[in-house]
Image: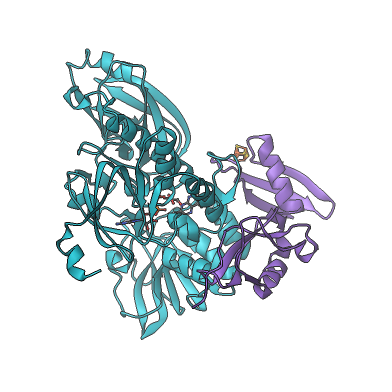
């Protein structure tokens, strides 16, 4: 094909009813649900060479307890969906990177078979997942050397490419990925010297602390961070230091740890460059789109689900969110979605103790719809009540035994309650979700 | 002997203090329900773990294929099982669920593939 044939981006490859960007668990669940609901002409655009997203490298078990009632490994969980997709006529375009997108749901993508493509969709589901926070985002001073990896990159090396990142490793951050990698590297013969966590409590699940660190006598240093990276060409060591309660390193507590590898497990960032290019409104706190109860963004017909919307700790919730986005997309495509944008709308805001809520706004409808509001806390709580308030009246309550920032929680609200408590949508006040003091 | 065990069965995460000797468990406190007792008992008497790892694979898209034990194995066996897994080299195609090693190290557990990897034609 002469190059000019695809020059300028005018070559329309195809129009679809529904295009899903990203073929991880969120995108696969959305595609299958949309297919089951009878949507014709569905496409998944995935930049990797197979479906599955991040699950392909998460070879440990612990996935699917809620959705399948059994413990699967990441690849097994992904196969449950990708095998089903094979039996459908869903168009799966692999090695296909969406590089630009417009508000009118025109997408621009490249792949080795077709080159540059223009794809038009009636509805779009964003399911691009997230990426890891890297050294740049942390601003650790010291040498610019090889041997520093995000935990997920090291995970891909070890679990998919069969490459070990080094021989003596230090892990910064006690998120689950870091903990899982501490065990994984130990099993592969790498000496893991310790996990350093700036907070005074671990970021990951207790189960992972027990089975990934304690089982292998790997020390966890809380309230400790890395203040300097040493080396020429390759990491030769790091300087750690204790931090005070404002997380400022305490002078005199520095320790030098010799290592050739540093893994960073310091958080995930939703991958939303495309979303922003489309001009979709964002919610600062989650780093994802600003959505309503149907997971619709502020742009009609564009929905979001999975880690691109907010970082999830459990893949089961990602799957459910993907299915929900598909149901909303179906209603939108069929034009059976009520003309909600003309309905009164209230904001949902995090109150005392909470960091964020999702959805961030709700269109009021006088029906029996149940709206699940997800939230994360700012700090750790034991045995607390979380309540939903509107006009200073409590409309829902939930007892939570353990509320911690790393575990998402939710509370269910009845649409009809919101309707009544706002005097049939006239007296609009924010819906506040908060920890009862 | 005394040991503190954090129960991981539910999110409450009770700290269970166990007093035990060669004859078994003498006393236990700190648990909030029976599941905690069962967990702590198993952790003291015969702790088991699922092992997940990978084996080398030829003629596939990736150089390793993920595997797991078909059931939890005794914790002391982890190193032995890993040594066995390291020596194995399989050929694509491999299907999820294929048995890679039968009854690994006499644990009664098989090592099974957790991914499906097609044969890639080498050029
Ligand atoms: C390392 C790690 C370990 C985890 N461990 C566990 C666990 O033990 N248990 C558990 O329940 N959960 C775990 N999780 C969480 C869970 O796996 C994730 O929440 C889930 O995989 C997110 O699914 P997703 O579909 O939103 O994103 P992803 O799986 O990240 O999928 C997104 C997909 O979109 C594609 N994509 C992105 N941008 C583009 C573009 N522009 N064009 C085309 N394609 C694009 C990507 O290639 C990717 O395939 C873990 C997560 C990580 C990162
Ligand atoms: S003892 Fe019972 S309540 Fe406590 S963590 Fe274990 S299962 Fe949960």
Q: Residue furthest bottom?
A: A232
Q: Position of residue B72 (x, y in %)?
A: 70, 54
Q: Quadrant of residue A389?
A: top left
User: What residue is shown at x 42% (from left), y 67% (from top)?
Assistant: A153
Q: Quadrant of the N terminus of chain B?
A: bottom right
Q: Nearer the viewer, residue B64 or A18?
A: A18
Can see residue A299? Answer: yes
Task: Give the total of numbered labels.
Answer: 0
**Left or right: where A21 falls relative to B92:** left
Q: Nearer the viewer, residue B46 or A162?
A: A162
Q: Is A154 drawn above or below residue A25 in the view shown?
A: below
**Left or right: where A361 falls relative to A194:** left
Q: Position of residue A355 (x, y in %)?
A: 31, 42
In this picture the colour scheme is by chain
**Left or right: where A210 falls relative to A362:** right
**Left or right: where B49 falls relative to A354:** right
Query: Which colour denotes chain A?
Result: cyan
User: What residue is shown at x 40% (from left), y 76% (from top)?
Assistant: A238
Q: Position of residue B74 (x, y in %)?
A: 73, 58
Chain letter for the purple colouring in the rendering: B
Q: Position of residue A29 (x, y in %)?
A: 44, 43
User: What residue is shown at x 37% (from left), y 72% (from top)?
Assistant: A252
Q: Is A143 drawn above or below residue A20 in the view shown?
A: below
Image-quarter location of ligand 2:
top right
Q: Quadrant of residue A271?
A: bottom left
Q: Residue furthest right?
A: B23
Q: Is A278 drawn above or below residue A111 in the view shown?
A: above
Q: Quadrant of residue B89?
A: bottom right
Can see residue A378? Answer: no
């Amino acid at each position: 094909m002469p190059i000019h044939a695809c020059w300028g981006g005018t070559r329309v490859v195809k129009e679809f009813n529904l295009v899903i960007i990203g073929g991880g668990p969120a995108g696969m669940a959305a595609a299958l649900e949309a297919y089951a609901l009878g949507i014709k002409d569905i496409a998944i655009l995935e930049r990797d060479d197979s479906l599955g997203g991040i699950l392909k490298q998460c070879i440990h078990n612990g996935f699917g307890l809620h959705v399948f009632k059994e413990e699967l490994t990441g690849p097994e969980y992904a196969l449950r969906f990708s095998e089903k997709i094979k039996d459908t006529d869903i168009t799966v375009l692999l090695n296909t990177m969406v590089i630009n997108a417009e508000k009118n749901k025109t997408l621009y993508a490249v792949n080795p078979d077709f080159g540059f493509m223009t794809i038009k969709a009636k509805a779009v589901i964003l399911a691009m997942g997230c990426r890891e926070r890297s050294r740049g985002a942390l601003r650790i001073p010291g040498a610019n050397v090889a041997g520093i990896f995000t935990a997920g990159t090291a995970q891909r090396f070890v679990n998919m490419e069969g490459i070990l990142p080094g021989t003596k490793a230090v892990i910064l951050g006690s998120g689950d990925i870091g903990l899982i990698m501490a065990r994984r590297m130990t099993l592969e013969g790498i000496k893991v010297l310790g996990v350093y966590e700036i907070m005074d409590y671990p970021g990951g699940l207790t189960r992972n602390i027990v089975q990934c660190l304690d089982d292998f006598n790997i020390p966890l240093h809380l309230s400790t961070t890395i203040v300097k990276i040493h080396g020429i060409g390759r990491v030769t060591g790091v300087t750690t230091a204790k931090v005070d309660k404002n997380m400022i390193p305490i002078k005199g507590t520095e320790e030098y740890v010799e290592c050739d590898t540093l893994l960073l497990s310091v958080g995930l960032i939703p991958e939303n460059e495309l979303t922003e290019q489309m001009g979709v409104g964002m919610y600062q706190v989650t780093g994802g789109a600003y959505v309503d109860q149907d997971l619709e963004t502020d742009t009609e017909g564009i929905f979001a689900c999975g880690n691109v919307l907010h970082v999830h700790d459990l893949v089961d919730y990602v799957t459910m969110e993907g299915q929900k986005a598909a149901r909303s997309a179906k209603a939108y495509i069929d034009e059976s979605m009520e003309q909600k944008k003309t309905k009164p709308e209230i904001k949902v805001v995090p109150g005392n103790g909470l960091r964020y809520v999702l959805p961030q706004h709700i269109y009021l409808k006088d029906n029996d719809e149940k709206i699940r509001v997800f939230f994360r806390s700012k700090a750790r709580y034991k045995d607390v009540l979380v309540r939903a308030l509107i006009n200073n009246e409590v409309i829902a309550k939930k007892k939570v035994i353990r509320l911690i920032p790393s575990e998402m929680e939710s509370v269910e609200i009845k649409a009809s309650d919101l309707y009544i408590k706002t005097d049939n949508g006239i007296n609009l006040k924010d819906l506040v979700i908060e920890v009862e003091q | 002997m005394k040991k503190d065990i954090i129960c991981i069965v539910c999110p409450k995460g009770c700290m269970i203090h166990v007093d035990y000797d060669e004859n078994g468990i003498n006393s236990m406190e700190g648990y909030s329900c029976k599941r905690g007792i069962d967990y702590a008992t198993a952790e003291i008497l015969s702790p088991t773990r699922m092992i997940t790892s990978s084996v080398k694979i030829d003629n596939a898209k990736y150089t390793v294929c993920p595997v797991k034990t078909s059931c939890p194995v005794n914790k002391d066996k982890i190193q032995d099982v890993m040594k066995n897994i390291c020596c194995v080299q399989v050929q694509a195609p491999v299907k999820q669920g294929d048995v890679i090693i039968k009854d690994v190290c006499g644990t009664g557990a098989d090592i099974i593939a957790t991914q499906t990897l097609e044969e890639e034609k080498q050029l």
